[in-house]
Image (tube, rainbow, N blue to C red):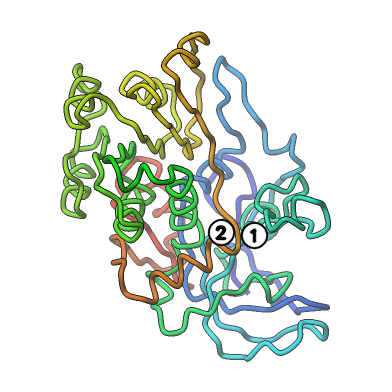
Amino acid sequence: MRCYCVTHHGQPLELLERPDPQPRGTEVLLRVKAAGLCHTDLHLWEGYYDLGGGRRLQLSDRGIKPPLTLSHEICGEVVSAGADAGLVPTGTTVLVHPWIGCGECPTCLRGEEHLCLKSQSLGVVRPGGFAEYVLVPHPRYLVDLNGLDPISAAPLACAGVTTYSALKKLGDRLQQDPVVIIGAGGLGLMALEVLKVLGGKGAIVVDIDPVKREAAVAAGAMVAIDGQADDAVKQIVKATGGGARSVLDLVGAASTATLAINASARDGHIVMCGLMGGEINLSLPLIAMRPLTLQGSYVGTLSELKELVQLFKGKTVRAIPIVSRPLSEANAAMEDLLHGRVVGRTILVP
């Protein structure tokens, strides 16, 4: 099979020819029909995460080394299954939950495999979707699309479940006050749609790119604010009627985290998903005195992904903007994402 792999960090993906995988045990073999491109793929391509202050979290320190087959947003058609996989109908089109753990530790047994310290996530540790075929270790990670378009559905495995899980952490505030969503990329536009399904009061979107701000307004944002404006904090405070009670930071940079804190009301709740990197200084007494909640959120559970797919099956959510490209354009697609030229999501099709 053909696959596009990171063989050297920071260098173009390399086209490799490998034998078609053969499923064993509980494994299921899928023919890839759609593979999404995410900012996490850029971090994996670069080989590190920026921790700020000149510090980096190297992938090699986590045992993740090239060659890497990227893409964790995968839809595919069931081709075959191992002898212990049970009944897995061939020809079925499925979405893959890629956030796989060891399956044995207390975290996994709680249904929180995405937080397992021995991650086996597809497109990160195990080969992902930038290939003609992908092996999934167990059929429980397959979610039947039941008629959903695989190209539109692929982003649900990351952009979808990430924003769904993060928004749920804000609880009843979603229905009480507008949510400030920082970042209008694929996650931000997805968050707008998920917020509607959850009965949210509305969203104020912040982004530095005017094209993405326009896309956010077209998708239903109440207002879109330039995050680099000198008065960005004042604009957010005015738009929220005194300060944001709920903030979803989908960028996770020093500038966006600082903006989120400065624009929050007393008793504000900030949920951070973005991994762009950096560090901030916190005046600790103010966290208690205001008081603020700063919470991280990392992708989501298998059960949350199934819930989200059901929402999409009910046709209550519209698809985010999608650019479909052949797998052979993987490097060009990576370049476009790296330089901020993508509105919505890019999906590669083998």
Q: Quadrant of residue 177?
A: top left
Is 149 situated left or right of 133 in this image? left
Q: In this figure, which residue is indicated by the disc labeled 1?
A: 122
Badge 1, how many Cα within 10 Å: few under 14, some, many 20+?
Answer: many
**x%, y% of residue 241?**
19, 29
The quarter in which the N terminus is drawn is bottom right
67 above or below 207? below
Decide: marks 2, 1 in contact (CB < 8 A)?
Answer: yes
Residue at the image point whose x is 82% and y is 52% from the top: 105
Query: Mark 1: which secondary structure?
Result: loop
Tell which of 172 and 295 is nearer to you. Answer: 172
Residue at image position (72%, 45%) is: 65
The type of residue carrying mark 1 is Leu
Disc marking residue 278 = none
**Where is residue 123 shown, x and y percent of the image?**
61, 57
Query: Residue at left 61%, top 34%?
Result: 48
Q: CA distance from mark 2 to mark 1?
A: 6 Å
Task: From the viewer's side, name the closer residue of 299 and 171.
Answer: 171
Decide which of 297, 65 is in the foreground and name it: 297
- Amino acid on which disc 2 is placed: His
Residue 341 at x, y = what percent? 29, 46
Residue bearing the label numbered 2: 72
Kindly state the secondary structure of the residue where label 2 is placed: loop
285 sits to left or right of 26: left
Nearest to the observer: residue 215 or residue 237: 237
- Which residue: 30% across, 51% down? 200
Among the two numbered marks 2 and 1 on one chain, the one whose residue lies closer to the N terminus? 2
Give the percent coordinates (x, y) of residue 80. 69, 86
Number of numbered callouts drawn:
2
